[in-house]
Amino acid sequence: MKVKIAFTTSDRIHVNAHFGWAKEIDVYEISDQGYEFRETLKFDGDLKEDGNEDKITPKLEALHDCTIVYVLAIGGSAAARLIKHGVTPVKAKSEEEEIAEILNKLVQTLKGNPPPWLRKALGHKKSNFLEEVENEAAI
């Protein structure tokens, strides 16, 4: 199973951008076999204007097929809108946290027994009922 994971970043190395202010979001595809860079989503305009809900609409649309988005910070309404669209926001431990480190940990986690929050985040992306039944039988 492959899923897409996104990261708000200003240097393409660290998770160091606020979701609302991020001009770039890097998207990777991940499975228990490894990960691969997919694309950089770019956003223009006045992104620092707090309270402007319209600024996050293009991001919500661009992230529609992602399972998780890692952010340095995110506002409550933006987080709620992501969750409503089936994307789980996760705050980085610090702006020093590296994207590659997170991806490597996720690959290892997917090989083993993912924690409940990750299973839930991945769960709504299941392709069909049969796959879900097979996965439940394996637990």
Image (cartoon, rainbow, N blue to C red):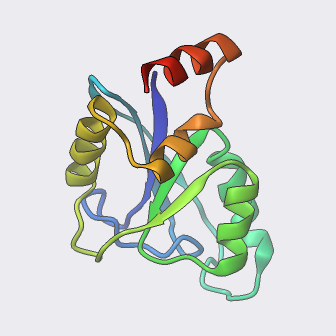
Residue 67 visible from this viewpoint: yes
Identity of the residue drawn at 62% across and 80% down: 75
Q: Position of residue 117 (x, y in %)?
A: 49, 53
| Residue 137 % position (x, y) | 50, 18
Residue found at the far bottom of this picture = 50
**From the viewer's perspective, is residue 75 above or below residue 5?**
below
- The residue closer to the viewer here, 15 or 46, is 15
Q: Quadrant of residue 123?
A: top right
Question: Could you tell me which residue is drawn at 29 percent across and 77 percent down?
Answer: 94
Q: Residue at x 68, y 58 (%)?
A: 83
Q: Nearer the viewer, residue 39 or 68?
A: 68
The residue that appears at 51% across and 66% down in the rendered structure is: 23
Judged left or right of residue 35, residue 1 is right
Which percent across, then down, holds residue 40?
45, 46
Is 131 located above or below residue 54 in the figure?
above
Foreground of the two, 54 or 5: 5
Total numbered circles: 0
Q: Which of the 4 quarters of the picture holds residue 37?
A: top left
Q: Is residue 23 left or right of residue 46?
A: left
Question: What quarter of the picture does the C terminus occupy?
Answer: top left
Looking at the picture, does residue 124 appear above or below residue 80?
above
Splitting the image into 4 quarters, where does residue 13 fall?
A: bottom left
- Residue 35 visible in image: no
Left or right of 60, for residue 107: left
